[in-house]
Image (cartoon, rainbow, N blue to C red):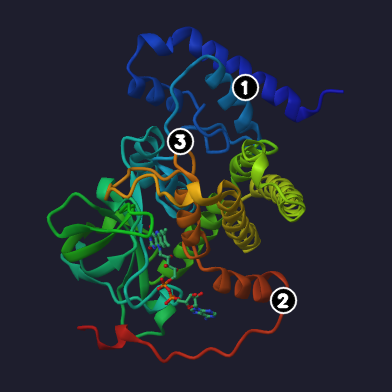
């Protein structure tokens, strides 16, 4: 029996075919095609009409994407604009004005404008609310000064999701405001930071009286912490809740390594592989359930669990793969200092995956911090006593 969702999916597939009849992918420039797809409401179907979607369930997106892929249509290279799609867009949708949504969402989705996340600072990572970057009023806008760090993809970004202190005289969570920052202006200096993998995927960003229009503020003055929570919840889902086919992703690579290296097999490794396979399958199915819940609105703290599991699995799977490959895996494939514009675990050797996955339990909130969130906000366990010994923002100029 056909469900309502089946009927909607069939209707969407027909819409895609009608769209393709008037927009031959091979006959038009890629960007023009993507803009037209957005304008037709076939970009992200769960977004509102007029903003690339049709206000439908997020679970219907797969049918649309599959239809476009089958026709050989270009996509928006989601790996390159992961922060935009996974974090900036839902934050703009939830807190932006209509003008901001219309200005930012279309070029974000087409990939014309890359977004980065200017949250972490040298003195504020896990304790993000203790950040010291200062935004002060300047006429009708703001001037921002300070230093951000670990800013992935800032070297190709057009916009930054900026969390800054606008009032140093109130409790730390209450003095923050959230902005979209133009990364291409002279007050923004982006310097590469080389990481364990040899690449400089992230950067440090120095802000010197960088200008922000008040119309680029997301949420009210002093409401930055609430807006940032939306970004962080979405970040955890974006990192840990991705859709994969069975035996897709890192478990697929580990299983392939098992077939490639019969000489390295032992009963112990076989047992480990089976356990990892089962864990990966549980994580995949739990991710599917999480995405269904998401269709109803903004994600809650539950996404933290998906992110913790993702990090642990990636680290265990990459270690397994390395062990199977034996001594050959220790020859690292490429230690050139590159500044990639996207991050992928595929297309590189097992050594890269092993090293890059170390960061998975740090980025988007460390596993220790996320376990605290799960304990307090999902399981309802008593909160740990808080201490505020490190308050660099107390000395900020008034
Ligand atoms: C690959 C990668 C990409 C990143 N990209 C970005 C980005 O694009 N934008 C951005 O803003 N940031 C980014 N980050 C930064 C990341 O969010 C921070 O590194 C992270 O939040 C931890 O902050 P920290 O490095 O200051 O460590 P700290 O907060 O100093 O923590 C150090 C250690 O202490 C533990 N710890 C701290 N407080 C507690 C506590 N209360 N209870 C228990 N344990 C605790 C932590 O778990 C950690 O093990 C990225 C990081 C990585 C690794």
Q: Which residue is mark 3?
A: 51
Residue 168, x across and y down, in percent: 31, 82
Q: Which sits in the foreground, 64 or 249? A: 249
Mark whose residue sits in front, 3 or 1:
1
Q: Which mark is residue 12?
A: 1
Quadrant for ligand 1 reads bottom left
Q: Which sits in the foreground, 381 or 54? A: 381
Q: Which mark is residue 288?
A: none
Residue 314, x across and y down, in percent: 58, 54
Mark whose residue sits in front, 3 or 2:
2
Residue at left offset 41%, top offset 92%: 389
Task: Look at the image and tell me whether residue 298 can be seen.
Answer: no
Q: Secondary structure at mark 2?
A: loop
Q: Which mark is residue 380?
A: 2
Verify CB contact (< 8 Å) between mark 3 and mark 1.
no
Q: Secondary structure at mark 3?
A: loop
| Residue 64: quarter of image | top right
Task: Look at the image and tell me whether residue 218 can be seen.
Answer: yes
- Badge 1 crowding class, 10 Å Cα cut-off, few under 14, some 14 to 19, many 20 or more, is some
- Badge 3 crowding class, 10 Å Cα cut-off, few under 14, some 14 to 19, many 20 or more, is many
| Residue 204: quarter of image | bottom left
Residue at left offset 42%, top offset 13%: 25
Q: Is residue 238 above or below residue 14?
A: below
| Residue 35: quarter of image | top left
């Amino acid at each position: 029996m056909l469900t309502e969702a089946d009927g909607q999916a069939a209707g969407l597939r027909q819409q895609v075919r009608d769209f393709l009849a008037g927009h031959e992918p091979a006959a038009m420039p890629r960007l023009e095609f993507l803009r037209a797809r957005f304008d037709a409401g076939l970009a992200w179907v769960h977004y509102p009409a007029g903003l690339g979607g049709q206000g439908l369930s997020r679970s219907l997106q797969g049918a649309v994407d599959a239809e476009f892929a089958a026709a050989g249509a270009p996509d928006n290279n989601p790996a390159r604009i992961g922060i935009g799609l996974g974090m900036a867009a839902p934050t703009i949708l939830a807190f932006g004005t209509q003008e901001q949504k219309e200005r930012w969402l279309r070029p974000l989705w087409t990939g014309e404008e890359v977004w980065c996340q200017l949250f972490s600072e040298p003195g504020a990572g896990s304790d993000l609310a203790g950040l010291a970057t200062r935004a002060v009023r300047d006429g009708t806008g703001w001037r921002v000064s300070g230093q951000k760090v670990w800013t992935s993809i800032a070297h190709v970004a057009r916009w930054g999701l900026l969390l800054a202190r606008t009032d140093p005289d109130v409790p730390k969570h209450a003095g923050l405001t959230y902005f979209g920052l133009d990364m291409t202006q002279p007050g923004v200096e982006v310097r590469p930071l080389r990481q364990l993998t040899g690449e400089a995927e992230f950067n440090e960003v120095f802000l010197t009286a960088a200008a922000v229009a008040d119309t680029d503020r997301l949420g009210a003055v002093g409401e930055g912490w609430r807006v940032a929570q939306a970004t962080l919840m979405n970040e955890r889902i974006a990192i840990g809740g991705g859709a994969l086919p069975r035996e897709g992703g890192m478990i697929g690579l580990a299983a392939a390594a098992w077939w490639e290296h019969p000489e390295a097999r032992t009963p112990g490794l076989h047992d480990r592989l089976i356990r990892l396979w089962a864990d990966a399958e549980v994580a995949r199915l739990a991710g599917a359930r999480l995405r269904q819940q998401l269709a109803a609105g903004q994600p809650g703290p539950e996404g933290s669990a998906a992110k913790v599991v993702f990090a642990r699995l990636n680290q265990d799977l990459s270690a397994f793969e390395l062990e199977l490959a034996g001594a050959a895996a220790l020859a690292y494939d490429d230690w050139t200092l590159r500044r990639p514009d996207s991050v992928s675990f595929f297309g590189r050797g097992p050594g890269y995956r092993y090293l890059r996955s170390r960061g998975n339990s740090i980025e988007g909130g460390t596993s220790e911090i996320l376990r605290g969130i799960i304990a307090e906000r999902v399981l309802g366990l008593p909160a740990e006593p808080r201490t505020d010994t490190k308050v660099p923002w107390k000395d900020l100029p008034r």
